[in-house]
Amino acid sequence: MRELRLFPLWLSIGFALVALVLYFCLRPPSEDPFSLLPDKFSHVVAFFALTVWFAAFVERRRYLVVALGVLVLGMVIELLQQAMGLGRSAEVADVYADALGVGLGIAASLVIRESWLQRVERWLSI
């Protein structure tokens, strides 16, 4: 784990992001035929964001653990969608989109040498 002074805050925000993804993925389909993002693109964006967020907590050598954890979350969501029967169905294409988001998130995290959360804390002079 990286040393973060505001670790509890950052972790709470991370869990809130997970809860938000769960909400949008598990709620019944909207009556509104228009959405902000196409389905697969929204999967890529959500899983990119989760990966970048949680990768900031760990050293680079632990990025594979983060990637696998976020990808497992995506698979569990698909299984829950199928089990809940709320008009949503499990799709392998969604898992592929999740995996693309995870891969892009890891790639973006590798570009930065240090945790972007550490940079934010330094910028805030915390």
Image (tube, rainbow, N blue to C red):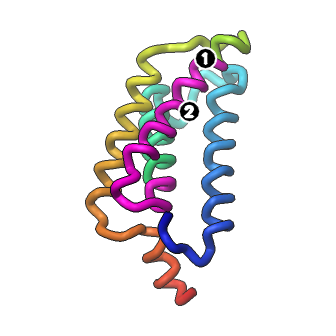
Residue 123 lies, with reference to residue 45, above or below; the image says below
Quarter of the view holding residue 100: top left
Q: Which residues are magenta?
A: 53-80
Q: Amino acid at mark 2?
A: Leu
Query: Which residue ends up furthest to the left in the rendered image?
Result: 111
58 drawn magenta = yes
Q: Residue sitting at 29 percent across and 68 percent down?
A: 113
Q: Quadrant of the C terminus?
A: bottom right
The answer to whether the residues at label 1 and label 2 have Cβ atoms under 8 Å apart is no
Is there any visible trace of residue 20 in the rendered image? yes
Q: Specify the label residue 122 is tagged with.
A: none
Instruction: Give the image location of residue 20, x and y in percent.
Output: 66, 42
> Measuring 72% from the left and 21% from the top, which residue is drawn there?
28
**With 3 as the anchor, is 28 left or right in this view?**
right
Q: Position of residue 61 (x, y in %)?
A: 34, 55
Query: Can you say whether 70 is above or below 56 in the image?
Result: above
Residue 79's label in the rendered image is 1
* Amino acid residing under circle 1: Leu
Name the residue rendered at 47%, 49% in the picture.
49
Residue 10 picture location, percent across and down? 61, 64
Q: Main secondary structure of the magenta part?
A: helix
Q: CA distance from mark 1 to mark 2?
A: 10 Å
Residue 42 as seen in the image, left or right of residue 14? left
Residue 82: image quadrant is top right
Task: Say which label, 1 or 2, has the lower sequence index.
Answer: 2
Q: Is residue 31 visible?
A: no
Disc marking residue 73: 2
